[in-house]
Amino acid sequence: MDEKKKGSEKKLNRRDFLKTTGGIAVAGVAAGGLFAAPAKVFGADMPKKWDEEVDVVVIGSGFAGLAAAIEAKQAGASVAVLEKMPMYGGNSIINGGVFAVAGSPKQEAEGIKDTPELLLEDMMKAGLYMNHPTLARMIAEKSREAAEWTESIGVEYKERVTHLGGHSVPRSYSASNGSGSAIVMKEVEKLKSMGVNIRTKTYVSAIIQDKDGKVVGVKIREGYKFPDENSGTVKYLKARKGLVLASGGFSRDIYFRTLQDPKLTEDVDSTNQPGATGELLMEALRAGATPVQISWIQLGPWTSPDEKGMGIGYVFNAMGAFVYGVMVNPKTGKRFINELADRKMRADAIIRTGQPAICIADSEGVKRVSVLEKTIEKGVVKKFDTLEALAKEYGIPVDALKETVNNYSKYVKQGNDEEFGKYMQTDSKPMETPPFYACRAWPKVHHTMGGIQINEKAQVIGLDRKPIPGLYAAGEITGGIHGAVRLGSCAVLDCLVFGRIAGQSAAAKV
């Protein structure tokens, strides 16, 4: 290699790197079936004149986006929050409202010993140790702080903590109304009190970068009508300090998710709201962001095939049958998995049986199911005076079912599940008190673990392994934190911790 060539290589900067290697990297990933997106030419979308300027632009109005906007505004920045759908909140507003908090006052009141280290260990185990350790550790260590932050803006939680699958101990806070809306609405109220309103029906069609690759704003369509990408009026919004991506995952993008996992065709339902599509992920990749673990897509094991989307049957399964009852294969009448295993283990186990599982609890086991009557009225959960009647309804061998329930009751009494090692709650009681309740369970696409790479400051990392100037991200659009499987109630935690960090970093132009 001659000296002239060596010299030119030493001067290779980020702009040159992406110009010379970015297209190759994008083409290589596309050839591997990850995504199909043309290379972006820096400065190509730069407007002659900006229609509006603010310090920080936040895309998305769920937990992460709203937290980012609050922090940025509190740091003194002017803020614009953009939401493509007619209603704010995204998946967060229909979320179950459970929030993992390690070493919390609520746990202490119940005599439950827990630490951030144990939460991190649970996350890493469920994630098959594919989690990026530094990022995963951050949300575990900041879980109590995040919970206290929500309480400081008025969010209320139920007195007792909940035990969700994959967690070693009960640790999840439950929103007072049983929905993520309890958190979203308080975040919105906080923003409004600070003079920030959410701009709904505002679609972001392009991330705008200057000739050196720095993110300086966005091209938007005001008055957008989902899903028509050509609807609305085109405008240009400048972000003087930073752009925060908090637009969620792509569980409703059938084409893209099927590229990642061919089994997830249109025949597989999703718990997500219709707008959970991948446009901003694609745009971030075109802007040079590094993709991380995008093919890891989670199915929720507690959803019912007897209702569309998330529904409400999952509350019975997650809060009742999985914690205090049993899940059986209707062909055998027997349990086939630890009902509190992580989501992937349970979803995979249900699918292997070839038919929906039957989740069962007695009158003692449903006491913490806040929407029990609604689930019965909807017909998703059914009520039976006897196990015989329940078995007849679902075609379960009655003697096998009785044996399963009797064995489980014995395990509860002795405090040890001899079959699957399920954690027994301190208030668990034998399944002996009719009536009995049942709900069918079949997995639906729930969460996309992969996304774009960020660092501890929520800066988006480019293909040159350096932060993309002016670009930040938080929530489900990011990847690496949860690895192969996200534990239940860790999404709220992730969104709030990194949403706050993203807002702070953007306002400070970190």
Image (cartoon, rainbow, N blue to C red):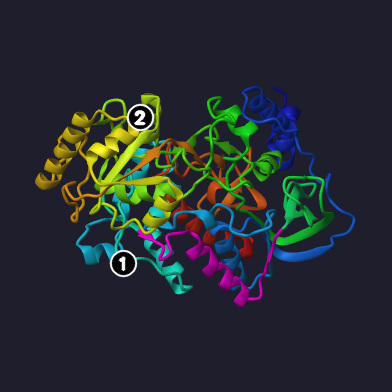
**Residue situated in front as seen by the camera: 428 or 135:** 428
Q: Which mark is residue 349?
A: 2
Residue 502 among those drawn in magenta: no
Name the residue tied to disc 1.
159
The C terminus lies in quadrant: bottom right
What SS does tag 2 mark?
helix
Mark 2 to mark 1: distance in Å?
33 Å
Task: Look at the image and tell me whether residue 489 can be seen.
Answer: no
Residue 445: where, in percent of width, then height? 51, 38
Tell me: 449 left or right of 49.
Answer: left
| Of callouts 2 and 1, the N-terminal one | 1
**Residue situated in front as seen by the camera: 210 or 286:** 286
**Considering only vertical position in the picture, is 76 above or below 464?**
below
Tell me: 234 left or right of 389.
Answer: right
What SS does tag 1 mark?
loop
Q: Tell me which residue sits at (63%, 65%) in the image.
A: 507
Residue segment shown in magenta: 173-200
Q: Tell me which residue sits at (58%, 58%) in the image.
A: 89
Mark 2, other Cα within 10 Å: few <14 / some 14–19 / many ≥20: some
Residue 451: where, in percent of width, then height? 57, 41
Q: Tell me which residue sits at (35%, 29%) in the image.
A: 349
Q: Tell me which residue sits at (73%, 41%) in the image.
A: 15
Residue 178 among those drawn in magenta: yes
Residue 364: where, in percent of width, then height? 23, 54
Identify which amino acid the numbered label 1 is placed on.
Glu
